[in-house]
Amino acid sequence: MANSFYREIINDHNLRPSHKRPLPDADLELRGVNPSCGDDITLRLKTADGIITDGAYTGDGCAISQASADIMLDLIIGKDVATARHLYELFSRMITGTITDEELDELEEAGALIDVSHMPARVKCAVLGWRTMNMLLDDVRG
Ligand code: ZN
């Protein structure tokens, strides 16, 4: 991570996550594993009328995987399913290096992970939470 401001955002979410906790009354739950790094998270979401009303994760992994999941939950809680899927698509394109500046603004703090697009070994870490979220939303009627 060349940019120290971005690095600070990632460190902060890793060390002081807002959403790393159990969520016993979640209606959606899915485990996501990235064997190449050892990242192993379980993502839980609550939804009502197509809105993600709450979310949390548990598990372990590298700073990038943990921070990315925490930042993602900041972004998607309170949003509808279509918006969350849109943000997933933007995040995926950011990581593969095909995103515009306007789209990057939509990702807010998740933009701090843009340097991962130059770190192929870390891509699976960064997308783990997001990919898991997108798979979970397959079970929600929008
Ligand atoms: Zn990792």
Image (cartoon, helix red, strand yellow):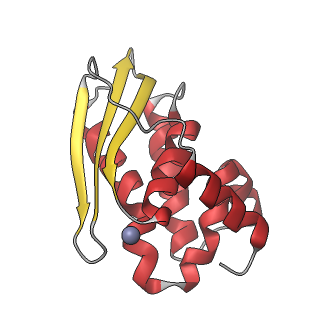
Of the 4 image quadrants, the one containing the N terminus is: bottom right
Image quadrant of ligand 1 equals bottom left
Residue at 60 percent of width and 66 percent of height: 113
Compared across the picture, whether 138 is left or right of 116 comes to left
Asked if residue 48 shows in the view, the reply is yes
User: Residue 8, position in %: x, y?
Assistant: 71, 61
Asked if residue 97 shows in the view, the reply is no
Compared across the picture, whether 20 is left or right of 15 comes to left
User: Residue 132, position in %: x, y?
Assistant: 31, 50
Residue at 55 percent of width and 51 percent of height: 15
Residue at 41 percent of width and 30 percent of height: 55
Above or below: residue 21 compared with residue 129 = above
Q: Nearer the viewer, residue 133 or 25?
A: 25
User: Residue 70, position in %: x, y?
Assistant: 50, 46
How many numbered discs?
Answer: 0
Q: Residue furthest front?
A: 15
Q: Identify the image quadrant of residue 62.
A: bottom left
Of the 4 image quadrants, the one containing the C terminus is: top left
Residue at 22 percent of width and 42 percent of height: 30
Compared across the picture, whether 127 is left or right of 132 comes to right
User: Residue 9, position in %: x, y?
Assistant: 68, 56
